[in-house]
Image: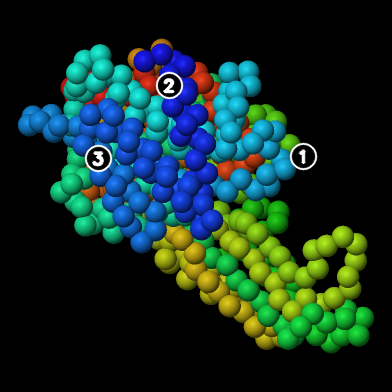
């Protein structure tokens, strides 16, 4: 198989608009899952498409033989919405290469990364006739909406999915060419609140000063969640379970390249901001946060329309660290919101999706094997990091299957995941194919 053959297959995979959150793309998402089934069948693996109340789950296996470790490789074929589409420099579902970089929705998150593993296995099967481990692929279509049906699937299929370790490439590298093993992820807890005032939008001159403005109150409540100067969350009890970094982590992270300048260039912000007393790595990887993800209400069109809107809404997400419990955090935040809501408006609170944080020891057993594979692939010592994002299913693998997860990232800091112009270097895609082969050889030992 040539490099162009591999690239052509990735392009075919990326053309599916498998947006899991949008019901208009249900067929696209199903078609993408069936494309994976056909791919595994062509490779000679046994494969099943498992229905769920949402999008289907693909499970593929090689022949499992006694005496070999069993490795489960996880990925997801669903992608984020593409809005705002006008900010894309090329169509999001028509892969385009510019200067050796693939631009398309899902190129990094997660189709490019999981297909690299699939093609690594295919190359081993073509050249060696087998891979040195018992292998299970588990690829779902709902990661971008919190994997609501994967936990029940794990519980119902413990024997089918029984393994010794899980491998995932859905994380990042600290810099180009720097191999990176992620051993921890933040958890997540989402919720939103809606404020209702008058029955209809009111004239702001006639009623202003006598009727509370839901949009104004929403902004005030949102502002109450954190200290504008220190960045510290002001929800009572929010930090009670937070665990500090271990000494070895502080020492390891101190050797990482400075990220502040790169963050300036990537984001365009005039100044970085975060919780006082912590550097950028600690703020993003080891400290909890609360963010406003969306806020709205009232007139949104051109020019002025002088109204007091009848309602307003705010969407929130909390990123969590060990040992914060998502359900408890949702309750604490909801209590804070109610405490700060005046009687002049009515409040409705809707909890959203959630997931636990995850952390493992990367310097024992399979973690050391993963480090060897990364070193062999990139010819450099791997960096050991946590990440600020959330993959809720990683902790579920630990809870249900009783195994740790190796997160071997291939995404670069400027990959623009979840944003317009998501991208993935061809170089990293090819490195992923090599990494898969090296990883399975190391795990077999």
Q: Nearer the viewer, residue 366 or 76?
A: 76
Callout 2: few (<14), some (14-19), or many (20+) C-alpha neighbours within 10 Å?
some
Callout 3: few (<14), some (14-19), or many (20+) C-alpha neighbours within 10 Å?
some
Left or right, 176 with reference to 148? right
Q: Earlier in the sequence, mark 2 or mark 1?
A: 2
Residue occupied by mark 2? 6
Q: Earlier in the sequence, mark 1 or mark 3?
A: 3
Gap in Å between the C-alphas at discs 3 and 2? 21 Å
Residue occupied by mark 3? 47
Q: Callout 1: helix, strand or loop?
A: loop
Left or right, 234 with reference to 361? right
**Is there CB contact under 8 Å for labels 2 and 1?**
no
Q: Callout 2: helix, strand or loop?
A: helix
Residue 256 is labelled as: none
Callout 1: few (<14), some (14-19), or many (20+) C-alpha neighbours within 10 Å?
few
Q: Earlier in the sequence, mark 3 or mark 2?
A: 2
Q: Quadrant of the N terminus?
A: top left
- Tell me residue 326's x, y (percent): 43, 61
- Tell me residue 75's x, y (percent): 38, 40
- Tell me residue 173's x, y (percent): 49, 28
Gap in Å between the C-alphas at discs 1 and 3? 50 Å
Q: Is residue 345 visible in this depiction of the protein?
A: yes
Gap in Å between the C-alphas at discs 2 and 1? 41 Å
Q: Nearer the viewer, residue 388 or 243?
A: 388
């Amino acid at each position: 198989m040539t490099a162009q053959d591999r690239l052509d297959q990735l392009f075919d995979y990326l053309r599916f608009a498998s947006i899991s959150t949008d019901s208009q793309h249900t067929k696209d998402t199903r078609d993408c899952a069936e494309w994976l089934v056909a791919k595994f069948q062509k490779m000679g693996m046994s494969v099943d498409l498992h229905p769920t109340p949402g999008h289907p789950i693909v499970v593929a296996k090689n022949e499992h033989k006694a005496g070999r470790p069993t490795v489960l490789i996880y990925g997801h074929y669903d992608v984020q919405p593409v809005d705002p589409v006008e900010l894309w420099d090329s169509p999001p579902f028509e892969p385009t290469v510019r200067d050796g970089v693939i631009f398309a929705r899902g190129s990094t998150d997660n189709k490019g990364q999981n297909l690299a593993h699939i093609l690594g296995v295919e190359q081993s099967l073509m050249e060696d006739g087998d891979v040195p481990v018992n292998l299970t692929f588990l690829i779902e279509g709902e990661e971008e909406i919190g994997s609501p049906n994967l936990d029940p699937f794990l519980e119902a299929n413990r024997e089918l999915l029984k393994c010794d370790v899980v491998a995932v490439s859905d994380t990042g590298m600290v810099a180009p060419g720097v191999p990176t093993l992620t051993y921890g992820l933040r958890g997540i807890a989402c919720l939103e609140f809606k404020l209702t005032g008058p029955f209809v939008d009111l004239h702001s001159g006639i009623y202003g000063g006598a009727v509370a403005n839901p949009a104004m109150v929403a902004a005030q409540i949102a502002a109450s969640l954190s200290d504008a100067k220190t960045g510290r969350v002001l929800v009572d009890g929010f930090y009670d379970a937070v665990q500090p970094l271990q000494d070895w982590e502080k020492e390891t992270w101190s050797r990482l390249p400075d990220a502040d300048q790169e963050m300036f260039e990537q984001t365009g912000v005039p100044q970085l901001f975060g919780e006082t007393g912590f550097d950028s790595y600690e703020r993003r990887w080891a400290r909890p946060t609360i963010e406003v993800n969306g806020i709205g209400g009232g007139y949104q069109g051109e020019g002025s329309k002088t109204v007091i809107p009848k309602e307003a809404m705010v969407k929130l997400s909390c990123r969590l660290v060990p040992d914060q419990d998502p359900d408890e955090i949702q309750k604490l935040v909801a209590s804070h919101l109610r405490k700060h809501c005046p009687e002049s408006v009515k409040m409705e609170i809707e909890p959203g999706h959630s997931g636990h944080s995850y952390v493992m020891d990367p310097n024992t057993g399979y973690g050391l094997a993963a480090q060897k594979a990364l070193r062999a692939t990139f010819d450099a010592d791997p960096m050991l990091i946590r990440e600020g994002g959330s993959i809720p299913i990683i902790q579920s693998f630990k809870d249900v299957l009783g195994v740790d997860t190796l997160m071997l990232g291939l995404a670069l800091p400027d990959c623009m995941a979840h944003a317009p112009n998501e991208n993935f270097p061809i170089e990293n895609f090819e490195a992923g194919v090599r990494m898969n082969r090296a990883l399975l050889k190391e795990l077999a030992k």
